[in-house]
Image: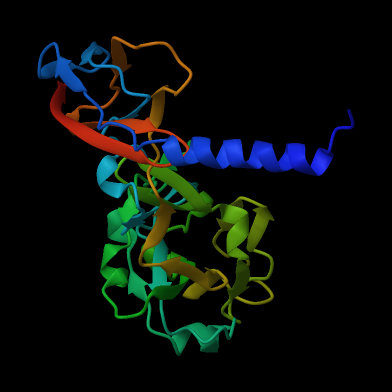
Amino acid sequence: MKFNPILIIGICLIICISSCERIEDPDSPVFEVLAEKEIYRVGDSVRFVFEGNPDIIAFYSGELGNSYEYKDGRIAEPDYLINFETQSQNGAQTDQMRVLVSDDFTGDYSIEGVRGATWSDITSKFLMAPPNNGTAYVPSGFGNLEEFLNTDKDTIELYFAVKQVVKNQNINGLGNLNRLRYFTISSVYETLNKTLYEHANFGWTLFSTPNKQPDRASLENSYTIMMRNSWWTSPEDYYSRETEDWAVSIPVKLPKTLDLGPDRSISIKGVTDISVKGYTYIYTTPGEYNVVFKATNANIKSQKEITKEIKIIVTN
């Protein structure tokens, strides 16, 4: 007897189609979750106990990046923080080095250009090295740029400047040798901290007033700005002049919002896994967390899911 391959294929297709037609929708999951208690300390093992055996179990801890509330996406409004380090030595004048911000600087990197722009002095947001403090660098702490985000623009464009003023040293005492290094901007949202711009990314341009002794300010390397006083008295008297040094950045763009994408779940059980009776998780940060477990029954035809929520409080 000869086999008819076309007939055999047709019979197989009929069987497959009939089988698919007989597949029913999955049952709704039967699933419950209990926490052993509500309040824990940081570092404790939080134990969740399950009842039921759904095909799939997914876990949302309620933390950043793992919150059911943001499973479809998260748009964040971050804080932007500046930090750096300063050094000041061999002088007596105070408040010489200032940190400035402008949103209308035209990119004319000259004394005339910076004087034609509007600059906000944000030095008070930081701890600066005091005069004659030696070679030690002083961390600035973190200064927030929140007031510059109060605009209708989706993205703000700012210029940053480090400015030094040396007053008449015959009257005001010796000017310092000042250094600023590691100028950095970070975006901060809840527990997410990301460095956006490091010192070298700012593309600093350095210039001074024409009455300044030459070569008394420099970009010493990719991460340090150095500005110091004049000392010549002959053939020109630079010592008694009031002078300015400026280091000005390229334009820095900061979006008002960041698209962090959807938060993801942690998989606890898959379709082919054996039954799971519970789950243990450890929180590293205090807070109140809305924990969600998503239970799913699924086949090739469809799926059904339910969620169970539990509040967990974590203290120090």
Q: Residue at x 36, y 47 (%)?
A: 130
- How far across and down, in percent of the image, does residue 78 sit? 33, 56
Q: How is the image coloured?
A: rainbow
Q: Which residue is drawn at 24% across and 16% down?
A: 52
- Foreground: 57 or 135? 57
Asked which quadrant contains residue 298, the reply is top left
66 vs 107, left or right, is left
User: Residue 37's x, y, as percent?
Assistant: 10, 14
All told, the count of numbered labels is 0
Q: Which of 193 and 164 is in front in this view?
A: 193
| Residue 86 at least partly seen | no
Q: The N terminus appears in which quarter of the rendering?
A: top right
Is residue 168 in sight in this rendering? yes
Q: In this rendering, is residue 64 above or below 156?
A: above
Seen from this angle, which residue lies furthest left?
Answer: 38
Front residue (pair 264, 145): 264
**Residue 8 position in % (x across, y down):** 75, 36
Q: Which quarter of the rendered picture does the C terminus lie within?
A: top left
- Please report the residue visible at 68 percent of the width from the left and 70 percent of the height from the top: 214
Q: Which residue is drawn at 61% across and 50% down?
A: 223
Residue most extreme to the front? 1
Place residue 73 in its image quadrant. bottom left
Toward the viewer: 268 or 146?
A: 268
Q: Is residue 69 left or right of residue 275?
A: left
